[in-house]
Amino acid sequence: MAEYRIDDLAREAGTTTRNVRGYQDRGLLPRPVRRGRIAIYSDMHLERLQVINRLLRKGFTTRHIADFFTGMQRGDDLAEVLGLEDVVSAPFASTHTATMTAAELKDLLNTTNPRHLAKLTEFGLIAEEPSSKSKQRRYRVLDTDTIEAYSRLVKLGVSLDGILTVHGKAAKEMADVASTLISAGRTFIAEQHHDGWLPETKDESAWAAELLAELRKAGMVSAHNVLNRELDAAMSNQLADYLGDRG
């Protein structure tokens, strides 16, 4: 089992020593073992910090997280009761990924332009592997379906600059759609209970888990179908406008 001093633990967990001490004071993190004046942390502390970070990113407060851990100490199976794995920890997005060299990425998108690579990184489509050397850069493609779709457009002569501009605009609008859908779910839960409510029984947990899962499905289906209908309408309108002078 690995051992860490507080600075090393914070660095491994992607947080700060101040946060580590704060979590200890709130009871979210067990106290370390003392060896003289040195505090020694273990993999268990690192795992707990990683769980805390994940829950905070999901929008849970430290009070909610404290409730989770208190239940764990009582012997509750919170991963089952609260649907933690499916409802909280598992991301909604599920895309295919791949690792490729800079040359392979160039073959797909016909570019080595740093500005293009920066935009692709900003949009969460690629990430440079931290261990890659300057002469042998490697990238993690975080959404191969999208990159391959853009590759086909580039091979048909569409400008990558134009593709990335459209991607940025569409991503912003889709973020607004996602916010609308998730806010609606939050409002419904708050109306049924109150903001900050957490399930206290298995029945409540099952209801919350099913609600969030169905909210996701409904959002995906409606967004997909609305987009297809709007694409059909826009294609028809644009075609009519494009051919207008031929009449």
Image (spheres, rainbow, N blue to C red):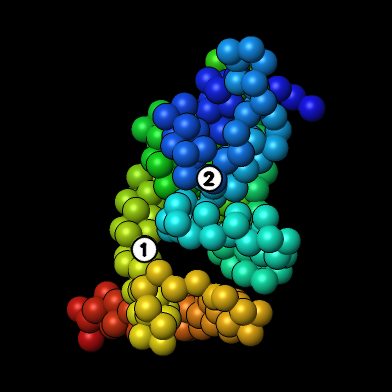
Residue positioned most to the top: 36
- Quadrant occupied by the N terminus: top right
Among the 4 quarters of the image, the one containing residue 49: top right
Q: Position of residue 78 (x, y in %)?
A: 67, 64
- Examine the rendered structure and indicate whether residue 140 appears above or below residue 180: above
Query: Is 158 on the left-hand or right-hand side of 50?
Result: left
Q: Position of residue 176 (x, y in %)?
A: 32, 67
The answer to whether residue 211 of the structure is visible from this angle is yes
Element assignment for label 1: helix
Residue at image point 59% right, 68% down: 87
Judge depth for marks 2 and 1 and give the one in front: 2
- Examine the rendered structure and indicate whether residue 176 appears above or below residue 2: below
Res. 175 mark: 1
Among the 4 quarters of the image, the one containing residue 73: bottom right
Instruction: State which tag comes first along the sequence, 2 or 1.
Output: 2
**Nearer to us in this view, 96 or 146:** 96
Residue at image point 68% right, 60% down: 74
Q: Position of residue 240 (x, y in %)?
A: 28, 83
The residue type indicated by label 2 comes to Gly
The residue type indicated by label 1 comes to Ala
Residue at which label 2 appears: 27
**Nearer to us in this view, 3 or 234:** 3
Between marks 2 and 1, how big is the CA–CA gap? 35 Å
Task: Count neighbours of disc 1 (C-alpha within 10 A) and say few if under 14, some if 14 to 19, many if 20 or more.
Answer: few
Element assignment for label 2: loop
Residue at image point 52% right, 55% down: 65
